[in-house]
Image (cartoon, rainbow, N blue to C red):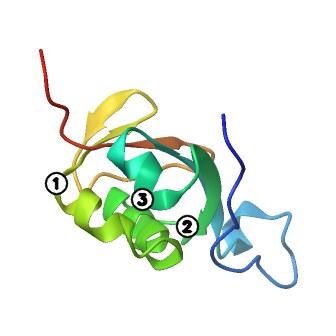
Amino acid sequence: MGEVGTEVGREAVGDVGSAEHATTQTVTLRYWAAAREAAGVDSEPLSVGPAATVSDVVSAAVGAHPALERVARAATFLVDGRAARAESAVAPGATVEVLPPFAGG
């Protein structure tokens, strides 16, 4: 694995230990092939809102790595190893994988 990137977002202020007061959650993003090249890292933690979707996670990643936008438009996504759509929920601690189209067979 490569370097770990910078977290996006901010931690909750106040009662951070309480899940009901949490304002962010951390998920792990893993990049494959062209997505890895665009992001410049293999994987990284990202902080997103508590009710985040795949779309929210990818938007945060694109914000941190603008070159990822083109790849993300054509990519498919896995959440904890299962195929996911843009509107799929992402639980705290989940791993979201960005899979660009692959050539070959």
- Mark 2 and mark 3 residues within 8 Å of each other at the beta carbon: no
Label 3, label 1: how far apart the Cα atoms are: 13 Å
Left or right: residue 6 versus residue 104 is: right
Left or right: residue 76 versus residue 42 is: left
Kindly identify the amino acid type of the residue bearing the numbered disc 1. Answer: Ala
Label 2, label 1: how far apart the Cα atoms are: 26 Å
- Which x, y percent locates residue 82? 33, 29
Kindly identify the amino acid type of the residue bearing the numbered disc 3. Answer: Ala
Label 2, label 3: how far apart the Cα atoms are: 26 Å
Where does label 1 land, which residue?
A: 74
- Which x, y percent locates residue 74? 16, 54
Q: Which residue is found at the position 72% from the left and 48% from the top?
A: 3
Where does label 2 land, which residue?
A: 50
Kindly identify the amino acid type of the residue bearing the numbered disc 2. Answer: Pro
- Which x, y percent locates residue 15? 87, 76
Mark 3 vs mark 1: in front: 3
Left or right: residue 96 versus residue 7 is: left
Q: Which residue is found at the position 29% from the left and 52% from the top?
A: 88
Name the secondary structure under disc 2: loop
Which residue is the extreme one toward the bottom? 13
Name the secondary structure under disc 1: helix
Where does label 3 land, which residue?
A: 38
- Is residue 100 placed above or below 65 in the rendered structure? above
In what quadrant of the picture does the N terminus appear? top right
**What is the crowding at mark 3: few (fewer than 14 residues within 10 Å), some, or many (at least 20)?**
some
- Is residue 43 placed above or below 18 in the rendered structure? above
Disc number for residue 12: none
